[in-house]
Amino acid sequence: QVQLVESGGRLVQAGGSLRLSCAASGVAFSTYAMAWFRQAPGKEREFVGTISWRGISTVYSDSVKGRFTISRDNAKNTVYLQMNSLKPEETAVYYCAARKTYSGSAFYGDYDYWGQGTQVTVSS
């Protein structure tokens, strides 16, 4: 059974930093491209970033570029999202996702597996 479990979400003050983790099981993790999306209340799911199998290629949303970093540790079957200089409008549920083939896609429909999400709340 494929399972992605996010963790690390919490309340953080504006300008602060937070690192989210996504632990994967049931898949050949090192062969999967991974991505992070977020969804704020009443809004569509938004692409944050994606990373290739080996972690060499990454694509980020323009809104987070330079502040967020996606990385992976294949030995631990875990992908991370390091978030710096957080803004209140980035309060959202953050989801990790996986797909077999890396394409750099920002479209949520291109991803096959999803976690349940972790809540990040950025206070002003």
Image (spheres, grey):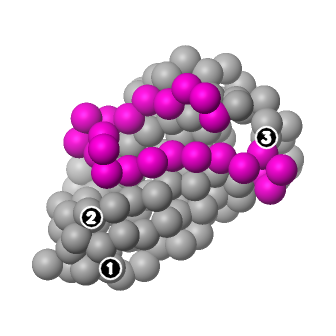
Question: What span is in magenta?
Answer: 55-77
Q: Residues within 10 Å of mark 3 (few under 14, many from 20)?
A: many
Specify which label sits upstream in the sequence, 2 or 1. Answer: 1
**How far across and down, in percent of the image, does residue 66 sit?**
30, 44
Picture residue at 44% right of the left edge, 39% below the top: 49
In what quadrant of the picture does the C terminus appear? bottom left
Please say if 104 is above or below 36.
above
Nearer to the camera, 37 or 67 = 67
Q: Confirm or deny contact between disc 2 and disc 1 (CB under 8 A).
A: yes
Residue where numbered disc 3 is placed: 29
Question: Within the magenta stretch, is there residue 70?
Answer: yes
Badge 2: how crowded within 10 Å, few (<14), some, or many (20+)?
many
Quadrant of the rendered image containing residue 16: bottom left
Q: Say which residue appears at 25% left-offset and 35% top-offset.
A: 62
Measure the C-alpha gap from mark 2 to mark 1.
Answer: 8 Å
At 79% from the left edge and 40% from the top edge, which residue is drawn? 29
- Expressed as whole percent of the image width and height from the top left, the position of residue 1 reads 85, 49
The residue that disc 1 covers is 12
Q: Which residue is mark 2?
A: 86
Q: Which mark is residue 69?
A: none
Magenta region includes residue 57 = yes
Specify the amino acid type for callout 1: Val
Whether the residues at callouts 3 and 1 have beta carbons within 8 Å, the answer is: no
What number of labels is visible? 3
Q: Position of residue 112 (x, y in %)?
A: 64, 33
> In the visual, does 81 lie left or right of 66?
right
